[in-house]
Structure formats: structure tokens, C-alpha cells
Image (cartoon, coloured by chain):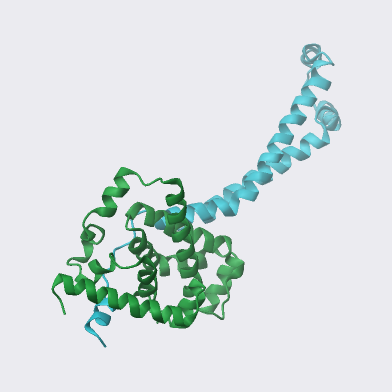
Chain colours: A green, B cyan
Amino acid sequence: METIDKDILIRARAGDLEAFEYILSFYEKVIYNYCLRILKNSQNAKDVAQETFIKVYTHRKDIDPTKNIKTWIFTIATNTTYDFLRSKKRKNEISLDEENETISSFEAYYPQAGVVSDVEKAMEQINPEYKKVLLLFYQQGFQYQEIADMLEMPINTVKTHISRGKEQLKEILKEYGQN
Amino acid sequence: MDKIDEQLNNFSTVEVPAGMHQSVMRRINYQKIRPVLFVSFILLALNFLIIAWRINAKLIDAEFIDMAQDFLDVFSFNFSYLSTMWGSFFEIISPMFFLSAVLSLVGAIYIGKEITFHQFRKI
């Protein structure tokens, strides 16, 4: 797994904008895609991804150069995304445009990627808790312990979520006619 | 590895929307220079108050029009005039007013430097 040089992390912690911009360039794509998978709305995903990096800069003093910054950034991204969803739900502020985008074809989010696999489509139908863990485990390559720390849940719960998530995926894929 | 694992490992991704990177950097730059803007605003406000006080207390009370008329009557460009002007500079312009103006100028130069170096360097 590619990581950021320790020296850059030290510079970013000291407030060096060039070092911060390097971190931004390194993670903006994965963070945006992660937010997009959860929020299913490109504008909201963009806003939340931006907010995530603003928080990274604001809390730069918490950067630990000895640890993997990716875990920390994803923790912030996960919290920001779910805070956003909670606040939307509380305010009941889902506009008609957003709703249309959310319920439209899944391929609409990934027009540049060509054909979207059935697993990706099925992923949209499983329990959101399982989806979150599966995304972190498979798409981002985090270890069980890292996910457990990130989501503040026991490691066994992470393993259970992955296993149940996969079971749900298999069930949905059976309905699609796949084995 | 299951076929499902393989597919989960190969999810499609999209590119970052245009302007997201720039927008983040712009907001961070603003955050960085916000204290400077705050100090400059305070200096500007202080400047304004001093000017207002100066105009009120000194120039209007001292019948500014008459002062200007006297000045024109006695005006003659020579070294003694310059020397008198220099000597009475801080009588006309209060030291606090002068200091405030200098600080405002320094603040403006500093803001200009910060904006040039951070906001427009990369974007």
C-alpha cells in the first residue's frame, strides 16, 4: 500500500500548505469515491469530501507521523459523511433533485468507469452498516483492527459485518441470476 | 478467494469533480490568512476612529479654513519652511495616527504577500 512520506506529514502538521496540498492530491480521489458510494449524490459527496479535508487541515496538530494517516483521514471522512446524513435526515432536507439522483440508475455515478459490475449494484441494496465495513475492507484495504478503531466497534463486529454483508450480497446476486 | 471477493476488490472509481481541489485550497488559504485580515480590520477601524477624532478635536475646533488661509498667505518654499513643517509634523499629525497608518501599511503589505504566496501560487 502506498503511503505518504513521514517528512511530508511533519511539514503538514506544522501548517505547510505545500505538504498539505500533497496529502490532498494523494487522497482526494479515494475520499471522494468513498463519500460518493455512501451518499449516492455527486454534489453532496463533493461537499463532504471538501469538508473532510478542511477538518484534516483544522486538526492538523493531531497528525501522527508514526501512524498511517489514511486511517485517520478515513475516520474523519466516515464521521463527516454520517453526520451529514444524520443532519439531512433530521432536517428532512432531501430535495427533489437529490432524490431523483439518488434513485436513478447506479451507472449514472460512474459514467467514466464503463460497465458497472453486479456486485457494485448489489452493494447499494445491502444494509448500510455492512456496506460501510465492506467498502473500507475491500475497496480501501484496511485491516480488521483499523476498521474497528475507525468505527469504534469491536473487531468481532467488524468480522461479522463483513461476513453478513457478503451473505447479503450473495443473496442479491442470486436474484440477479449469478452464482 | 471467492469470485465475490475479487469483484469487491475491483470496484470502479470516478475522477474528482473539477474545482474540488482548488476549492479546498482556497478555503484553507482563507483560514490561514483570517487572523491577518482580522488584525488589519482592527487597525483600519482604529485608524478611522483616530482620523475622526483628529478632525473633530483639532481641525474643526481650530477653524481649519482659517488655518488653510494663513498657510497659503505665508507659503514660500524654502528650507526654513521645510524645517518648520518637519518640526510641527507630529503636532499636526498625532503620533498615534502616524503609528496606526504605518501599521496599516505593514498589514496591507503582509496580506498582499500571504495572498500572493499561498492563494495564487499553486492554483
Judging depth in this view, the residue of A59 and A118 nearest the camera is A118
Residue in the picture at 75% in, 25% down: B52
Residue A14 appears in the figure: no
Q: Nearer the viewer, residue A127 or B20?
A: A127
In the displayed structure, B76 sits above or below A15; it is above
Q: Is residue B9 left or right of residue B86?
A: left
Please name whichever residue, B101 or B32, is drawn nearer the observer in this view of the structure: B32
x and y percentages locating residue A115 in the rendered image:
17, 67
Residue A44 is situated, as x and y percent measured from the top left of the image, at 38, 53
Q: Residue furthest bottom?
A: B1
Q: Nearer the viewer, residue A11 or A106?
A: A106
The single residue placed furthest to the left in the displayed view is: A177
Q: Quadrant of the C terminus of chain B?
A: bottom left
In the rendered view, does B48 fall on the left or right side of A179? right
Quarter of the figure that contains the N terminus of chain B: bottom left
At horizontal 20% and vertical 73% (from top left) the residue drawn is: A173
Can you give x and y, in whole percent of width and height, for residue B113 in the image? 58, 51
Residue at image position (64%, 49%) is B36
- Is residue B90 at least partly visible in the picture? yes
- Say if A177 sits above or below A48 in the image: below
- Residue A114 picture location, percent across and down: 18, 65
Q: Quadrant of residue B98?
A: top right
Number of residue marks:
0
Residue visible at 36% across and 62% down in the picture: A38
Where residue A81 sits, quadrant-wise, is bottom left
